[in-house]
Image (cartoon, helix red, strand yellow):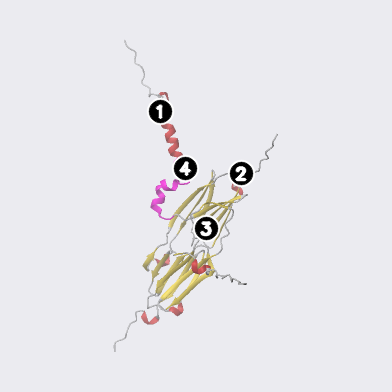
Amino acid sequence: MTNLIRWQRPDIAIWPGFGRLTDIRDEIDRLFESPFAELANSSRLLSGWTPALDLYEEKDNFVVKAELPGMKREDIEVSLHEGSLSISGERKSEEKYESAEVHRTERFFGRFQRTVTLPSAVAADKVKAQYRDGILTVTLPKTEESKPKSIDVTVK
Amino acid sequence: MNTTVQEEVRPTVDRAARQEFVAPKVNIFETKDGYVLEAEMSGVTKEGLEVTIEGNEITIIGRRQTDATPGELLFRERRLADYHRVFELDPAMDTAKVSARMEQGVLTLTLPKSEKIKPRKIAVD
């Protein structure tokens, strides 16, 4: 009598070639996490409003400036998560113009989100944000380890 | 022979004249009382704003506050140009009563229509 061997799902890992496929998947994940991930992010294509921003580096801080005209301070959300700064919010359209005849609408309304990956670590509790004249300025102080340090080269 | 060569000092071209401008995005609405024009000009305050009406044209110029760029630029998307745009006016507008408000980088211009243009009932004898 032949023994019936219980069928077991073959363990994928034992296939020698399969490990390479998971590497490719990791690479693709990393591609989508890069600063240009917005291109792959379909919600951007649908929303239409991606506010322009600049990223600067000073000795002790990173500074992000984003153009967000016509917002209310309370409608802007700024958050920091694992080395990425996220700026999002919603610009609501004015109800008083709903009944008016519209001649031109070039301004965007609705939700927006921008994420910037910071080159090095920042002190999350010391981040400051200021909104003035339609420009949001976020100042992110670097952690001590991230600041540039000069290294003495000794010559023996 | 002594010839003194006068070096011609060319006056530098007025920076404003040479500058590039960007057209601000606008929304234009019309209600029964008049028009409302909203122009997005980040970085512009009341002091940098110039609105002029000449003939049937309204010209909007917004000069940005000097943007002290901190440190080294790593990534740029913003265009730091000043704003300029010209609009043709509806002859029904009462240009004397135009009002402007500047808030968080948005200029709101209110252009009321002249009284005589508004629909008016005419009594029939």
- Mark 1 or mark 3: whose residue is earlier in sequence: 1
Labels 4 & 1 near each other (Cβ < 8 A): no
The magenta span reads A31-49
Residue A33, numbered label? 4
Reply above or below: A90 against A11. below
Quadrant of residue B68 within the rendered picture: bottom right
What chain does mark 3 sit on?
A: A
| Extreme residue toward the right, this view | A156
Number of numbered discs present? 4
Tell whether position B74 is magenta: no
Q: Amino acid at mark 2?
A: Ser
Give yes or no for contact between labels 3 and 4 (Cβ–Cβ under 8 Å).
no
Q: Are marks 3 and 2 in contact (CB under 8 Å)?
A: no
State the residue at coordinates (46%, 69%).
B108
Badge 4 and badge 1 both on one subunit = yes
Quick check: do tags 3 and 4 share a chain? yes
Identify the residue under disc 2.
A146
Q: CA distance from mark 4 to mark 2?
A: 21 Å
**Chain identity of mark 2:** A
- Which residue is at a point 46% across and 67% down the rendered structure image? B84
Q: Which residue is mark 1?
A: A18
Camera-side residue of B112 and B76: B76
User: Subunit of mark 4?
Assistant: A
Mark 1 lies on a secondary structure that is helix
**Residue type of the residue flagged with mark 4:** Glu
> Which secondary structure lies at badge 2?
helix
Q: Earlier in the sequence, mark 4 or mark 2?
A: 4
Q: Which mark is residue A74?
A: 3
Using the image, determine if residue A110 lies above or below residue A29: below
Mark closer to the chain start, 3 or 4: 4
Quadrant in the rendering for residue B86: bottom left
> Distance from label 1 to label 3 (Cα)?
50 Å
